[in-house]
Amino acid sequence: MTGKIVFEPRTDVGRERSENQDHLGSLRDGPVEFFIVCDGMGGHAGGSTASRLGIDTIEQTLAATADRPIQERIEAAVLAANTAIHEMSRERRELRGMGTTVVVLAVDTDRAQAHVAHVGDSRIYRLRGTTLRRLTRDHTMVQRLVDDGILTPEEAENHPNSNVISRSLGGQPVVEVEHGPEVLDLQDGDLYLLCSDGLSGMISEQEIAHLMSNLPADQAADRLIERANEAGGHDNITVQLVRWGPAAPAHDGEFVVEHPPRGPSTQELLAKERDAAAAEAAARLDADGPGKTGATTALDFSKPIDELQRQATATAAPAAAASADPEPEAIEEPDNTRLITILGLLTIVLFGLVLVLMINILRGGDDDTTPPEPEPQSDELPGDEEEPAIIIDVPLVPIQQDDQHDDDHQHHDGQQHDDGHQHHDGHQHDDGHQHDDGHQHGVPTTP
């Protein structure tokens, strides 16, 4: 085992976008190296701002938490990025609705282990021998259909709504970070790919595996972006290839493609929320009810939440009665001042309405005494009457240009967003980008 890391980052605007809203980054902290990809969304300004802010915040938080375990560092960094993006989107009107996906790969060179975490539909793959394994489970509405058993993973890959994401950084004050599937042991020749959906949504996983296996890492990174552009280049394209040790032998045949296991179904998620609510109700009961008299109550969490609440109420009532003061408390007389004031105001309003009505009646009577004007005589014959025109009043609906976004990510709020990214990883390339991991890279970013 050599422990040598080969790292090849690339990003490209694609064929249809005017701005690259993908960002990538990396950080070396002692024996641990972190690699990050963010795919921004939320309009021309929002998407790029969100992904860049995500990269910067994650790198800063990772650097400030060097004394903590790797998984805790990743969790803290991603949550800090979510908070920063969410707060900025609330403070600046032009950035409202912005967000970003994120994937993080941490390589512990001392222990020869890799850690994976993500939010959204950007992906991490590992090619080992002839097996390409996807290590991340998309946070999309289509993936929920897979989790519910409605679609197969193969059907989900080509589904027209596969880009409708269900989780991102910045969309909510708090986000759930998915780790795993487990801590991965590294083997010589392991090749990891971090990518935005501008790559995974354009070419097949078989082709991705073939290019990764049969080309050197630098050439494979370039060719992956070229193939995504040749397939249409509908979105920004970002790849990071990370190889552990020397390259594995090439394979020109079919590859085994492994997808992550199904996530919890919709019913399982609802049951989890119900159990959490029941546990919270039990905790309140223990603190406010029987806990004061030393009694304990067992709740059956398999029951519906409304039945649990009735059980909690029935249990709390005797305890409250037992702990009540035997001396009767004085009953305060209700304060009727507010009620009297309201009744007085209503009386004044009603009197005013009656007065207005009487004035209108009197004016109407005066109008009735005026003799009607004679109808004008028409020279037209009875058959010459002009048919009345039909007028359709169509209200004008203003076009809300601020809510229109031009991206491939759709959200549950119905807004359309525009993705684009920049190269931002702190590495030194011949294309003028500066990197901070000490690697020398000689392949420029694809134009």
Image (cartoon, rainbow, N blue to C red):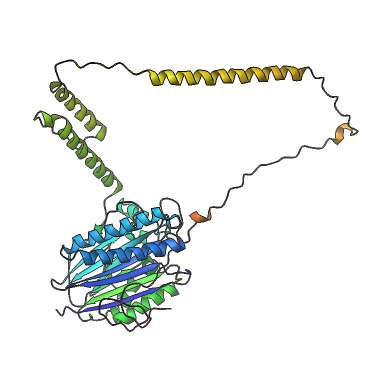
- Among all residues in the image, which is located at the extreme left? 294
Q: Considering only vertical position in the picture, is 431 above or below 168?
A: below
Q: How many marks?
A: 0
Tell me where residue 128 appears, x and y as whole percent.
Answer: 22, 73
Q: Looking at this view, is 229 or 372 the one in front? A: 372
Q: Looking at this view, is 255 or 390 the one in front? A: 390
Q: Is residue 208 left or right of residue 407?
A: left
- Among all residues in the image, which is located at the extreme right? 379
Is residue 54 something that shows in the picture? yes
Quadrant of the image for the C terminus? bottom left
Q: Looking at this view, is 285 or 276 the one in front? A: 285
Tell me where residue 119 appears, x and y as whole percent.
Answer: 30, 59
Tell me where residue 110 appears, x and y as whole percent.
Answer: 13, 73
Tell me what residue is drawn at x 31 percent, y 55 percent. 83
Quadrant of the image for the N terminus? bottom left
Q: Looking at this view, is 354 or 414 the one in front? A: 354
Q: Quadrant of residue 253?
A: bottom left
Q: Quadrant of residue 429?
A: bottom left
Tell me what residue is drawn at x 35 percent, y 75 percent. 10
Tell me where residue 11 appears, x and y as whole percent.
Answer: 37, 73
Is residue 151 something that shows in the picture? no
Q: Is residue 60 left or right of residue 161?
A: left
